[in-house]
Image: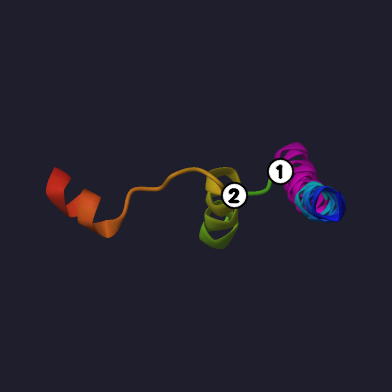
Amino acid sequence: MWVVFGSEALHLIWLRMEYKEYQEKTQHKIKLLQEIVERIEKGQEFTDDFRQEIRMVLMHGRNEPNDEDAMEED
């Protein structure tokens, strides 16, 4: 009986941690999109650093090809 309660408690802790991480990622994406809109409205150019940040945020969580995979495709 206690094993079930302990298992469920751990499961709830992990769910809470995953949800907090999801919220942080989503807030970062929203902030980035707001900055993109502001720059477009002002007519500013995008720097290479800003483009790289956009790529990193949008590609986060996706399966990116490994260097070995990229080498095989060449």
Report if residue 51 is visible in the image: yes
Q: Earlier in the sequence, mark 2 or mark 1?
A: 1
Q: Residues within 10 Å of mark 1 (few under 14, many from 20)?
A: some
Given the current orientation, which residue lies at the most extreme front position? 1
The x, y position of residue 18, in whole percent, is 75, 50
- Region rendered in magenta: 20-43
Q: Is label 2 in a helix, a strand or a loop? A: helix
Q: Residue furthest bottom?
A: 49
- Disc 2 packing (10 Å; few <14; some 14–19; many ≥20): some
Which type of secondary structure does the marked residue at label 1 adopt? helix
Position of residue 1 measured from the top left corner of the image (x, y, whole percent): 86, 49
Left or right position of 46 against 39: left
Asked whether residue 74 appears in the rendered view, the answer is: no
Q: Main secondary structure of the magenta part?
A: helix
Amino acid, disc 1: Ile
Q: Which residue is mark 2?
A: 54
Residue at horizontal 83 percent and vertical 52 percent from the top: 20
Name the residue nearer the viewer: 25 or 36. Answer: 25
- Residue at 59% across / 56% down in the picture? 53
Is residue 4 found inside the magenta-colored segment of the image? Answer: no
Find the distance from the CA under tag 2 to the CA under tag 1. 9 Å
Residue at 55 percent across and 62 percent down: it is 49
Question: Can you identify the residue that label 1 sits on?
Answer: 36
What count of labels does the image hold? 2
Q: Are marks 2 and 1 in contact (CB under 8 Å)?
A: yes
Report the amino acid beneath label 2.
Ile
